[in-house]
């Protein structure tokens, strides 16, 4: 009999590692143990199961060739033993055994191992507020919870939902409730924006508007303080600002690594709770590996360590762990936090560091905001994507990249390409010349990713100066706060007209792009000109010209009307 | 007055460089000269203009904000002078002048420069066959030709078309004729496959089937030997095998750099005709730069130099040239040949080296063929993409990546990510851990690109052995040629049944995936088993198991039924 390999955790990293190690060491005795009865499922698919896009939870547990990944499947097709409904209680590292509890029979026993893999995953953070244990309050932690939620939806007794947490799962759940079940849904986030620390403000506002346009009530800067309970059932969520009625409450305020077993066994666990592993996914005990949501990995941009609770990472880490367990040298260098999300008809994604995180990490961060077409502007069906490329002014290193786009793969394609570049420490100049495949139905001759790097290059070299969108919005809310500011709208006169009409030419001046060279002498020299166009590129060109002719008190509003229209501020005269 | 910068060529690299250099040096005197009256257009959009997807040729010459990029535009918005209908006759490097001819007045004059940029582009290769000058024979070389073709189509007098050349432009033109004009179209390629040297055989066959399914007559391995002319008009194309009637003939047999002007001026020009430049896009004369289709650049995979006639490269090269002209140090390191093409409902793309080219370059090349889902297999609308990842067995370096997919951005996303990786010399192991953003609506937990690298890893390490698709097809066409071969179909019995019925169990044996471990002893030991499934992954798993139990005379058919179904060979019992 070959090596005894025990794997604790049967969702993503565990089964991946088990299958890989069994293929590499066919004589190994591989056992997966999991406290759940359901294993090897696509947890990221839960919101789509709840919405109804995916009809049956079994689809989330099935292979692409429609076999259910249950105990039978693992033993018959992989030769892997799965002990489901079995909890790992403790690891005896000296004797190399795991104490396990059969949850069906309540019997305890010991399982010997030569190599152990911890793939214990993560668990939802539970808000410690009154009422959080009431009937009708859920976290999205496993398939059973998902089935329970869907059953309630199916019974037709839910007309109001509150989702606590404006992260990815919260947003996906809000969409599932609203879009396919027609439930009146409120989304509560205690920070001032959605997707905090992942997406920067202008793009988060685009998402927020999109959710509101699709009838999700978005409440920002409000903490959930109590689940109001009536006869044992949740009936409302009381926030710091209001009462939101609810027949169902979903808490999606983040996850934390499940690392108690590792800690209790004396393995090194970080302050953030992630099991510490080396690039071979080996813990501080060389006979114990760990992979998936329960570990900390290196962030390839910040150099720090972070927990990356993504199914995609779990699979990669599981494979690397399996390789090393099987004696195949293999390294997992770390991650860059690639992220993509569907929200109704919007895609939103990011990779690397957000502005807030980059600042905390001490980078001299700036960013280019742009709004190019996702394919040739003359090609039918083209749409605008809004992109922000973050870079370090000192080193020209790319720190992050994020965007919003229509519901196709255009944004995800750019996030992926940027992710590859970020993994190898790309600079602005590397991204400027990244060779995206071009054909009008798929992209633009100057790809959005290249163009974003061009803007960053101009900013970094000081050829371009820009105003922050936040600053511009504050001013538009109260133009008298800066009477010496004036918008110079270089778009077509017809596009500028409603703005000039609403704000008056002292605030909103129209001078079309092709007339600036002839008529710049009419421009006021005592005002700071905020140059404005659709995407920001004409504005930059005009800035360079105005600087040249001595009208230097000017700045560019990056991303332009394309971004602002999608942010949808109330002061906009046109939608 | 500032620096005098003269740019010869006004389509892509020329205008890009002109605009960039003018922004960086606002006091420069920038002049573009072009022998054509129409400049700064999206040449890659011509097939979509001809098809009607793009209504007016002006859209190809307009900005995203709908301004026509003509002489007025360049002087008014950019401060750039354009001399259209003006031919550059000769360069006097000693006196730093260009002799030009005004094609409207036939007047010659001289234009002085401090720095010259050659952006002379490429021209279609003309087949020197009888009749090639007849009325109705076109190349796709400029907008005038495109307008002339569309006029003929609009008159409704064209019912049959022949396109000579199975490259990208030929395929796009064939689609334009067939799909939107309902013209009976024949596509003639003298090599045995479409997209030769770009796409490898199995994927080229998928394209070929797709074109035939959409009523394009595809004739491979046939050379066009004569344009049959009647009363001055083309009426047919005579190939080495047949006569194909034609009211219109399009020759799209490739392009060659326009480098005569450079060569005549004594600049270094390669044997292939590309102007030789350094990484600053500087020719052998430090005062003369060159960019776009007319230059040779470094291939970042092969290390050799190549001509990359893509509008996207022209823009990047033009920007780098402009930077250096303006005194901003900037480098263009080379390219990897990213390529994407729409053909009806199919996308097909490639990056890096094809099998044929990699072999010629002396690599120890192998490839993994796979056929994963483009997004979570449980997500509505998912589809299969077919991928081939080429690698060097000695160094594990990735040499190329190519694929076919449905008409969305899924394939192009993977080509782009691979392009970034190839640009920095990625190995299989780098691609295995590339962090593609995952969410079920956009991708799979194990991304197709990661999965392709996994397969390559298994091949490279000798854990997986595969049969070439060509070899398998040859055998299926005549199973008696190898009576000792047998397919082991591990798919569901219902899927295998039509094959077993057609070929008999001696050729096509069904043993489902989940029964192999129990029943492998029934397998013949005197046959070479060709393990067959939908995508190749079950086959690999079964191979590992059979090897382990001593049934070692086996091989995997990579990509499986997903690929074969799309190739559509005649012997298939099901479609």
Image: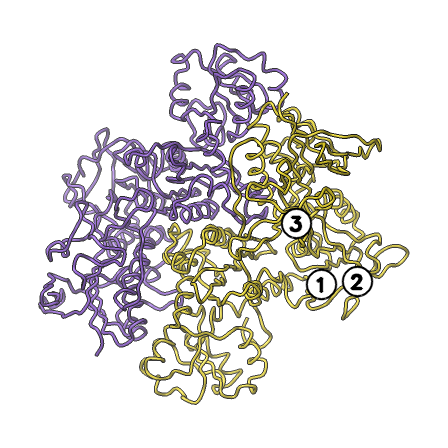
Chain colours: A yellow, B purple
Q: CA distance from mark 3 to mark 2?
A: 31 Å
Residue A239 locus on image (x, y percent): 77, 66
> Tag 1, which secondary structure?
strand
Residue position for label 2: A237
Q: Are marks 1 and 3 on the same chain?
A: yes
| Viewer-nearest residue: A281 or B406 | A281
Q: CB atoms at circles 1 and 3 under 8 Å apart?
A: no
| Name of the residue lying farthest toward the top | B526
Q: Badge 1, how many Cα within 10 Å: few under 14, some, many 20+? A: many
Residue A399 locus on image (x, y percent): 49, 60
Left or right for B205, reference A558:
left
Mark 3 / mark 2, whichever is N-terminal:
2
Mark 1 / mark 3, whichever is N-terminal:
1
Q: CB atoms at circles 2 and 1 under 8 Å apart?
A: yes
Q: CA distance from mark 2 to mark 1?
A: 9 Å
Q: Are marks 2 and 1 on the same chain?
A: yes
**What numbered label is drawn on residue A188?**
1
> Tag 2, which secondary structure?
strand
| Viewer-nearest residue: B96 or A81 | A81
């Amino acid at each position: 009999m070959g090596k005894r390999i025990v794997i604790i955790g049967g969702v993503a990293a565990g089964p991946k590692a088990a299958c890989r190690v069994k293929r590499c060491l066919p004589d190994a005795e591989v056992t997966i143990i999991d406290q759940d009865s359901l294993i090897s499922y696509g947890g990221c698919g839960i919101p789509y199961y709840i919405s109804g896009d995916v009809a049956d939870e079994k689809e989330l547990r099935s292979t692409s060739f429609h076999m259910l990944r249950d105990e039978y499947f693992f033993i018959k097709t992989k030769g892997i033993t799965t002990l489901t409904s079995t909890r790992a209680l403790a690891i005896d590292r000296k004797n190399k055994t795991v104490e396990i509890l059969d949850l069906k029979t309540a019997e305890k026993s010991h399982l010997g191992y030569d190599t152990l893999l911890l793939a214990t995953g993560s668990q939802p953070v539970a808000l410690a507020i009154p009422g959080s244990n009431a009937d009708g309050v859920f976290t999205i932690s496993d398939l059973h919870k998902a089935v329970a939620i869907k059953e309630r939806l199916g019974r037709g007794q839910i007309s109001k939902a509150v989702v606590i947490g404006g992260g990815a799962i919260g947003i996906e759940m809000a969409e599932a409730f609203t879009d396919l079940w027609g439930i009146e849904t409120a989304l509560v986030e205690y920070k001032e924006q959605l997707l905090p620390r992942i997406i920067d403000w202008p793009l988060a506002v685009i998402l927020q508007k999109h959710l509101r346009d699709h009838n999700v009530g978005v409440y920002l800067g409000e903490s959930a303080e109590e689940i109001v309970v009536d006869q044992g059932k949740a009936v409302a969520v009381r926030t710091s600002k209001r009462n939101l009625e609810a027949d169902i409450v979903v808490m999606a305020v983040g996850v934390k690594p499940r690392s108690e077993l590792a800690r209790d066994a004396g393995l090194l666990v970080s302050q953030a709770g992630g099991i510490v592993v080396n690039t071979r996914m080996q813990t501080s005990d060389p006979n114990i590996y760990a992979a998936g949501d329960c570990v900390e990995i290196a962030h390839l941009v910040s150099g720090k360590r972070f927990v990356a609770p993504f199914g995609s990472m779990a699979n990669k880490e599981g494979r690397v762990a399996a390789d090393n367990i099987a004696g195949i040298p293999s390294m997992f260098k770390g991650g860059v936090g690639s992220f993509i999300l569907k929200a109704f008809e919007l895609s939103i994604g990011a990779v690397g560091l957000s502005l807030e995180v980059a600042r905390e990490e001490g980078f001299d961060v700036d960013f280019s905001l742009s709004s190019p077409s996702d394919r040739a502007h003359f090609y039918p069906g083209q749409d605008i994507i809004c992109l922000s490329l973050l870079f370090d002014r000192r080193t020209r290193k790319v720190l992050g990249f994020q965007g919003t786009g229509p519901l196709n793969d255009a944004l995800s394609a750019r996030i992926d390409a940027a992710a590859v570049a970020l993994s190898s420490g790309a600079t602005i100049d590397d991204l400027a010349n990244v060779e995206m495949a071009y054909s009008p139905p798929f992209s633009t001759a100057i790809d959005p990713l290249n163009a974003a790097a061009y803007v960053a290059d101009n900013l970094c070299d000081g050829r371009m100066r820009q105003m922050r969108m936040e600053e511009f919005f504050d001013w538009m809310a109260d133009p008298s706060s800066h009477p010496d500011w004036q918008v110079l709208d270089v778009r077509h006169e017809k596009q500028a007209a409603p703005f000039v009409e609403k704000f008056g030419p002292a605030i909103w001046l129209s001078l079309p792009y092709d007339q600036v060279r002839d008529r710049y002498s009419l421009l006021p020299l005592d005002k700071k000109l905020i140059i404005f166009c659709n995407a920001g590129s004409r504005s930059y060109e005009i800035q360079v010209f105005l600087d040249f002719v001595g009208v230097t008190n000017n700045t560019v509003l990056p991303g332009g009307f394309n971004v602002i229209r999608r942010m949808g501020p109330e002061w906009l005269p046109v939608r």
